[in-house]
Amino acid sequence: MQSIKLKLYSILRYFYFLSGYPRLKEWIFNQRRILAIKLIGNKYSFAEIFPSADYFPVGIIHTNVQHTKAGWQLLNRGYDDEARAKNAIVSLRKFTMVTHDGLLVSYDIARYVQAAGIAGSIVETGVCQGGSAAIMCIALKDSNVELPQIHLFDSFEGLPHPNEIDYMPWMEEDWALKRTDFDGILATTGALVATQECAEEAVFKVANYPREKTHFYKGWFQDTIPGAKKEIGKISILRLDGDLYESTLFCLRELYPQVTVGGFIIIDDYGLIGCRKACEQYFSEIGIKPFLSYIDAVGRYFIKTH
Ligand SMILES: C[S@@+](CC[C@H](N)C(=O)[O-])C[C@H]1O[C@@H](n2cnc3c(N)ncnc32)[C@H](O)[C@@H]1O
């Protein structure tokens, strides 16, 4: 009798864990968000209200967040080849902070570029642990077409000091920055530090991309990009993921002219105020008004049309 009771108890506990617990956690998270919106109102962007992975608005399934992972296997965005992309995401999850949708779209764009024969290098500015670069590599490798060169830029020392224009309150908590750190100095803040070895593991070991087609540039964009532009040549995908105003503006000014017509510009951090300002400023400098397609709550992309 005792052992039957024990068995029943463990079965119940198992079901409680499977169904009840994640939902309870999700409910608590949502209540917190609803309360934050009630208290602070809608005048701030979501990123200002909700720090880190938790800053997505009520109702958005953000699959980096622990409490939504319970339903992740059921999540289906309806992409072609989604199962393949999902497997790739599983293998790279620990190498990236990019959202599930962010990775899906990068995968899909890389896949399209190969299939459509849009010639040029793949460039990422802001590689960090290498996951978003590696997901593009996996998609490229899935095609039979000759693989493009990929050029990967990062300080591998973390973010530099943001400018005043970048300031959003959650950065103080999430990136452990002081208010006085927003002085634009090109020196590390210690936030988002990853090693080049880690990114190499993602690109070479997990994605198995050929070394002879891959170029890593360690250092500040401002120091490394100007000297690499010639080698890069035409660009089919420019993936901007440097988070900050100056980092984004510099990369756009240097590299956008090399993006081929029909090529893609992915702006991973458009939801961050400094990055958005940098894009708006650059678009106005060169007189374009691109339609920005949504990737997720923070990311956008567009195709260069002329
Ligand atoms: C959000 S992380 C990139 C995330 C990454 N793509 C992933 O898959 O998780 C931003 C990266 O940009 C880099 N970064 C930002 N500004 C930079 C600059 N001016 N020069 C070099 N690296 C920079 C940081 O070192 C950091 O690794």
Image (spheres, grey):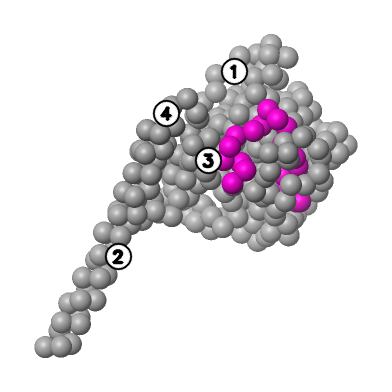
- Mark 2 vs mark 4, CA separation in Å: 34 Å
- Mark 3 vs mark 4, CA separation in Å: 27 Å
For the magenta stretch, what is the residue range? 153-173
Q: Nearer the viewer, mark 2 or mark 4?
A: 4
Label 3, residues with CA under 10 Å away: few <14, some 14-19, many ≥20: many
Q: Which mark is residue 290?
A: 1
- What element does badge 1 sit on? loop
Q: Nearer the viewer, mark 2 or mark 1?
A: 2
Total marks in image = 4
Spot occupied by residue 285 in the image (x, y as percentages of width and height): 73, 14
- What element does badge 2 sit on? helix
Q: Which mark is residue 131?
A: none
- Which mark sits nearer the N-terminus, 2 or 1? 2
- What element does badge 4 sit on? loop
Residue to which mark 2 is pinned: 17
Q: Nearer the viewer, residue 67 or 183?
A: 183
- Which mark sits nearer the N-terminus, 2 or 4? 2
User: Can residue 259 be seen in the rendering of this structure?
Assistant: no
Name the residue located 48 percent from the left edge and 50 percent from the top edge.
64
Amino acid type indicated by mark 1: Pro
Spot occupied by residue 288 in the image (x, y as percentages of width and height): 65, 13
Residue to which mark 4 is pinned: 41
Label 4, residues with CA under 10 Å away: few <14, some 14-19, many ≥20: few
